[in-house]
Image (spheres, helix red, strand yellow):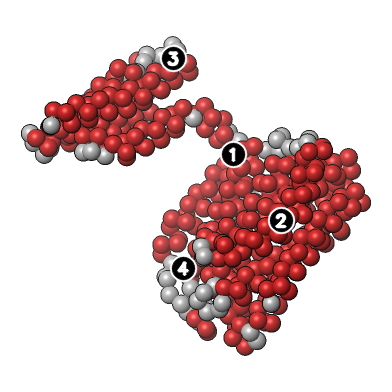
Amino acid sequence: MITTELLRALLVSLCLGALIGLERQWDEENWHPKTHLLAGLRTFTFWALLGNLCGYFTQTVHPLFFLAGFIAMGVWISLFLFFKQKKHDGHGYTTGAVGLLTYLIGGLVAWHQEKVALVLTMTVVILLALKPYVHQMSRKFSREDVRMALQFAAITGVILPLVPNENWGPFEALNPHSIWMMVVLVSGASFGGYVAVRIFGQSMGMALTGVLGGVASSTATTMAMSRQSRSEPSLAHDCGLAIVLACTVMLWRVILLATAVHPAIFMELFPWILCMSIPGFLFCGWRLVRHGKGRGEGEQTLFRNPLGFRDSLQFAALYALIIFAVKAADHYFGGVGLSVVSAVSGLMDLDAIALSLSQMAGQRQPVAMAIQGILIAMVANTMLKAGVVLVYGNRALRKTVLIVLILTAAIGTAVVVWLK
């Protein structure tokens, strides 16, 4: 029985090591054909088998066998790379690191963690194979983008764990940890959309611009496309497609953010968001079938980088103010005060009011009131974008987009009246 298990573990380790080695050999032969091959198919297979056997001997011979093997392998690879780099200006550091990881994968198999070993192997192979694409993608980002990405990491991984998780102030409305968590959610969604825009650009057409704009900033998309319709009237219909897509995606972005805070709210909001999305879906389907995806010409930069420490603090302050206003209005005026706060907040920042109401749903107010508030904010935000199109768009853009936005707001208003 022990022999059968050992043979099975060796076979699994052999296959996983061979998979990594195959990718490394293919990479060296295609991208660095003139450099000396540090390790290929056979070497990685041996390393995986070595890790598996050392793991087995740790269980049967000595508890430090696996650690000794890992140290010996690390020293050997380090010396090899040191002397190799003195003679050749070649590559090999990645291969050396992956070699150590392959040894550990063999050890995972020895300790009956085959699923973890398989997932780790596939992750390593995919990351290695994506090397040229990662390099190509990284060249599209500026130094400022990298700085902002590090700032997002600080917002998420450094500040968030340090913020106290306690309710403060009147009505116990202010929880610093919850407030900063909302900053992380919104910053993450905006930054993800911004990264997508920087990677893909606008060359894939106005349709993609609208979808990504709905994730990054539907208001910025509406403003940019409205102005572009005036400067380039021939692109008015394509700009209209981008605006409608951005405004429709915005509805679903809000429901996803709300669900992240209060998962039970999804099924309550889903049918109403679907109803509000019907005009946008119909318009976009008609445009795509009749005119295609658009040319994607014009401005090349719709969005600035959405992350900034000042912006994060401003959003945190706005969110805290809104959540306090919502609780105060609910306490003193009930549903009427909540509706007014939702409408005004929707004009300023839809994400903030949606997250505030979602957080309080089921705690200090009924879920139905939270849903009504979110829908009122969506209607107000949609009418704000209609106003932007009316002021900044040309006649052709207003003729098509205003109808869609007004219908969307009308459906939302009807739903709010129905729920009351």
> Quadrant of residue 162 in the image?
bottom left
Quarter the C terminus occupies: bottom right
**Secondary element at tag 3:** helix
Question: Residue type at mark 1?
Answer: Phe
**144 left or right, relative to 72:** right
On the image, numbered disc 4 is attached to which residue?
177
Front residue of 188/354: it is 354
**CA gap, disc 1 and disc 4:** 31 Å
> Quadrant of residue 73 in the image?
top left
Checking the image for residue 277, the label placed there is: 2
Question: Residue type at mark 3?
Answer: Glu
Label 3 vs 4, first from the N-terminus? 3
Q: Given contact means CB atoms under 8 Å apart, are the residues at marks 1 and 4 in contact? A: no
Q: Is residue 208 above or below residue 397?
A: above
Q: Provide residue 303's location: percent of width, then percent of height.
A: 69, 48
Instruction: Identify the residue shown where x is 71% and y is 34%.
Output: 203
- Callout in the foreground (2, 1): 2
Label 3 vs 2, first from the N-terminus? 3
Q: Residues within 10 Å of mark 3 (few under 14, many from 20)?
A: some
Q: Residues within 10 Å of mark 1 (few under 14, many from 20)?
A: few
Question: Residue type at mark 2?
Answer: Ser
Label 2 vs 1, first from the N-terminus? 1
**Secondary element at tag 4:** helix
On the image, numbered disc 3 is attached to which residue?
29
**CA gap, disc 2 and disc 1:** 34 Å
